[in-house]
Image: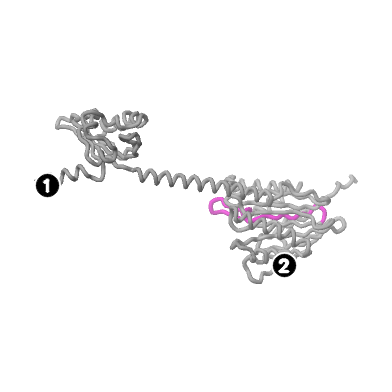
Amino acid sequence: MADATEDRLLYEHAPCGHLSTTPDGELVRVNETFLAWTGYPRADLVGRRRFVDLLPVGDRIFHETHVAPSLRMQGSAREIALEIVCADGRRMPVLVTSVLDRDDAGRPVGIRSAVFDVTERRRYEHEVLAAKRRAEASEARAVRLAQTLQQTLIPPTPPRIPGLDVAAAYRPAGDGRHVGGDFYDVFQVATDDWVVVLGDVQGKGTDAAVVTALARHTVRAAAVDHPAPHEVLHTLDSALRGADTDRFCTAVLVRLRREGAGWRATVASGGHPLPLLRRHGQASRPVGAYGHVLGIMPAPAFVDTALDLGPGDALVLFTDGVTEGRQGSRLYGPERLAGAVDAHRATAADTTGAVLADVLAFQAGDPRDDIAVVTVAVDAGPPAPPA
């Protein structure tokens, strides 16, 4: 007798609802737990209603088209997400596991179901989903902000400079959603006195864009007071180390002053790949001296390298997204870059466009890092008159 009482208590007050129905779904037994959850009197359910009668319309259709066939064919249906319409009209989310019982001849004799109240779980899932949507919306706003910042950091087209042919290209990594740290700028300091800077801030996103803005505007301000590129890089290094950021930066800076029919170029690098010098009719080669990365060292050193540029000569500045472009384990490399630069000499745009296209083709159009290229060429002048 004690065992029977214990079994009854275990059934009636189990931590889940227990239902027994005929093969066609008529309720023949319901435990106290299910009645307490739903608010129905036992007399309103047993022998009077089918299980599907407790479901909203959509769940009834799902039960008849998916759950019932699964029970007939496989003998069970596990963890089916449904809703029970309670006596007061509210809907209780549940998970239902059902088993079809058969007699010795294999004929269906009844269905036993365990019903689990997942109200709290559903509430948690909704909270997680809402948090995910808020995070996605926040990320989208951050991306839009970063892209807006980047639009101010990279001029859409370089300025027209009498005597010089200038072209630039920028391609962000991946799908372009996340703004990178590559930047360039071409601006005038005085008559026939111009500055070209190309840099790469560590990382991506809004924080990188903010540091990029700091770097670009610091260079513009410092170039007015400091004629030597290495002095401008020292000023930028101090600004980065004094800023509230742990991001570092590399940059290469070129100051161009007109001298007669040509230009005097002074180059300084702060941890950045050296630009390529392509003389008229000659193969290109790196020019300048490496300095320290900006924003890290307590006493960095930068070196100015001066050279004269004549008609047809060009400087090609680029970020490491070019030479470090990958195709499997292979790097694009400086040799392939030099080959692309030497093979396309018609205009600065021809050189820049060819380099960008070749780097993208090398990576099947999906670069893993940002790419920036700037070409500055001295106008070759009018063609010589025929002899």
Magenta-drawn stretch contains 174: no
What amino acid type is highlighted by mark number 2? Answer: Val
- The residue that appears at 68% across and 69% down in the rendered structure is 301
Quadrant housing the N terminus:
top left
Task: Pinpoint residue 56: horizontal percent, then vertical percent.
Answer: 35, 31
The way the protein has been coloured in the rendering is one colour
Q: At 29% across and 32% down in the image, what residue appears?
A: 70
Q: Residues within 10 Å of mark 1 (few under 14, many from 20)?
A: few
Residue located at (53% from left, 45% from top): 137
User: Disc 1 residue type?
Assistant: Asp
Left or right: residue 131 versus residue 120 is: right
Residue 131 in view: yes
Q: Position of residue 273 (x, y in %)?
A: 66, 59
Say if 31 sits above or below 214 in the image: above
Residue 41 in the image: state x and y as whole percent: 24, 35
Q: Name the residue under label 1.
A: 3
Q: Give the range drawn in magenta.
A: 310-332
Q: Nearer the viewer, residue 245 or 385?
A: 245
Relative to 204, say whether 67 is above or below.
above
Q: Do the residues labelled 1 and 2 touch (CB within 8 Å)?
A: no
Q: Is residue 319 magenta?
A: yes
Which residue is under mark 2?
Answer: 303
Task: In this rendered view, identify the residue nearer to me: 122 or 207.
Answer: 122
Q: Residue 145's spot in the image, x, y percent?
A: 61, 49
Q: Which of marks 1 and 2 is nearer the N terminus?
A: 1
Answer with left or right where residue 41 lies relative to residue 219: left
Judged from the image, the secondary structure of the residue bearing numbered disc 1 is helix
Query: What is the distance, in whole Å, between disc 1 and disc 2 at their CAs?
Result: 93 Å
Residue 293 in sight: no
Return the residue found at the far left: 1
Locate residue 64: give its quadrant.
top left
